[in-house]
Image (spheres, coloured by chain):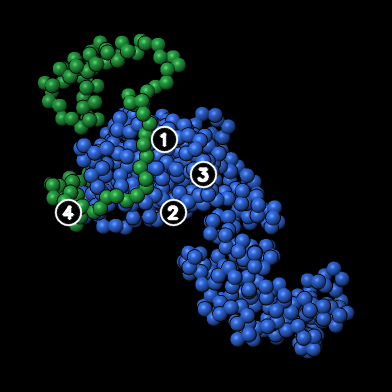
Chain colours: A green, B blue
Amino acid sequence: MLLPSAEVNRIAQLARLHLQPEEVSGLQQDLSAMLALVRQMQAVDTQGVQPMAHPLAMVQRLRTDQVTEQNQRAAYQAVAPQVDEGLYLVPRVVE
Amino acid sequence: MPWETVIGLEIHTQLATCSKIFSGSAIMFGAEPNTQAALVDLGMPGVLPVLNQAAVQMAVRFGYAIGAEIASHSVFARKHYFYPDLPKGYQISQYELPIVGRGVVSLVSEDGATKSVGVTRAHLEEDAGKSLHDVFGGMSGIDLNRAGTPLLEIVSEPDMRSAAEAVAYARKIHRIVTCIGICDGNLQEGSFRCDANVSVRPLGQEQLGTRTELKNLNSFRFLHKAIQFEVVRQINILEEGGRIVQETRLYDAERDETRSMRSKEEANDYRYFPDPDLLPLVIDADFIATATTNMPELPDARVARFQQVFGLSAYVADCLTSRRALADFFESVVAFCGDATLVANWVLGEFSATLNKADLALAEAPVSAADLAGLLRRIQDQTISGKIAKQVFAAMWQGEGTADAVIAARGLKQVTDTGALAAWVDEVIAASSVQVANYQAAAAEKRPKMIGFFVGQVMKKSRGKANPQQVNQLLQSRLG
């Protein structure tokens, strides 16, 4: 079953990818193949199996609550496209 | 048609840690923009989040305080959306397996009735940064100091039925998180933020109506007003045959109304999945025991103790425990002077009113617990009346010294000398022949009320310094 092109466009929109119209059909094929694999896996009986959140059989280590980072704003902002008064400037996001 | 309001709250409490939830950046309020934003907070490639132990301990303390189940195994998930103040393109939160499960809090209303509100869950997450619009022509300014600040989001069941109940619940959560020391509770600085999910349904209907989510509620008063406005708005729409659109609405305090946020092009699709950068969080009994050592007496337990030990009503006990510092202050004053009812009246009345008027925090009050007890002792031993005590209190507040110093300096000691009192009583009787005749002609059961006139006159003559009980007795014997 082929994923409808509208779905491909919606996924692209969610990922903020700007697709060219000619790219859509190839992605329809690729994504459909991935979904077919997922469908195949879904056929496995997982009753009573705890979902795995992480492939490593380890648990989260915790950090002591201490301030270890110093202010390096000047260094970080040196590579930013545009800054003003200590703020990172980006294209305006609301009208 | 009678309508029923249904409200659930999502409360974001900023946890009182020193550093961020996944990085070692500081989280001091009011720092210069981006001076507390390191590589992890900026979402730079190649960095990894490392979970802050104190944030986890604080979440555990909250769960313990509301009797909730603490998950032995919880998972961090990525919540995806695009916004410039979220540089990674996702927020690290918890979705299917939150750290704190179902719990319950109880509310007490003024008439003493209690109500339970369910807490569905509470989960750990990171805050986003802040965007500044309208400052840099055509651009938005981004400050990432707040990005990565630890939050505990507390989600309630839709158990509240009025704006007043929603406020009572929010205040209760506020009281708990400040009491157990996991949040500074500062609403103005955004340390405690409420979003309200509000819907209405015909009374008796089981199914919930379509809800709207109200944001920008940065005080309990605005929470109350926003819900009231929204309920009326929804009922009006439904009664005119319209339907409610599920949306997020912002409260505008200046206009006292809620407004739809610019509708998004499509519904939110956060695409949650477990964050591969973080391993499952495992909490064992030892961890819980460590996190919950030094738990203070919780608000509900303190209310119960105040009722039992001090004989206070549920409502007064509730008011006194509204803030831990206030309850501590009350107990210190009682320790000095004993009479809990008198102390409660003063602490909740004159003392709190003066404090609020001066806009001071309790720790900044110029009158200490010992000072206030010193004043109340002078009421107890009848050196001064309650009325004069208010004058003395005002003078103490202005820095004129202890109660005894003020009473001596201003000559406010109550007159209990029978000779002086009798002279005032005789003067008043001589000057009030009409009232005396009326009093003597009146039935016995009406007299206690009528005698108030004479007592008032004597108090006036004495400039408030006569002992009212003695004056009353003298008048009764003189008037026959």
| Residue that label 1 marks | B244
Do tags 4 and 1 sit on the same chain? no
Quarter of the image where one finds residue B320? bottom right
Q: What's the residue at 11%, 21% (across, down)?
A: A22
On the picture, is B6 further left or further right than B29?
right
Mark 2 and mark 3, same subunit? yes
Q: Are marks 2 and 4 on the same chain?
A: no
* Chain name for mark 4: A
N-term-proximal mark, 2 vs 3: 2
**Quarter of the picture holding the N terminus of chain B:** top right
Q: Residue B108, image x and y in percent?
A: 61, 48
Label 3: chain? B
Q: Residue at x 79, y 79 (%)?
A: B470
**Mark seen at residue B292:** 3
The kind of residue on which mark 1 rests is: Ile
Q: Pointer 4: residues within 10 angstroms few (<14), some, or many (20+)?
A: few
Please state the chain letter of the residue tagged with numbered disc 2 in the rendered image.
Answer: B
Residue assigned mark 2:
B184
Q: Are marks 1 and 3 on the same chain?
A: yes
Element on which disc 4 rests: helix
Quarter-of-image position of residue B455: bottom right
Residue B412, relative to residue B88: is it above or below?
Answer: below
Q: Is A60 situated above or below A51?
A: below
Tell me how far mark 4 sits from mark 1, CA to CA.
49 Å
Earlier sequence position, callout 1 versus callout 3: 1
Tag 1–tag 3 contact (CB < 8 Å): no
Q: CA distance from mark 2 to mark 4?
A: 31 Å
Measuring 58% from the left and 58% from the top, which residue is drawn there?
B327
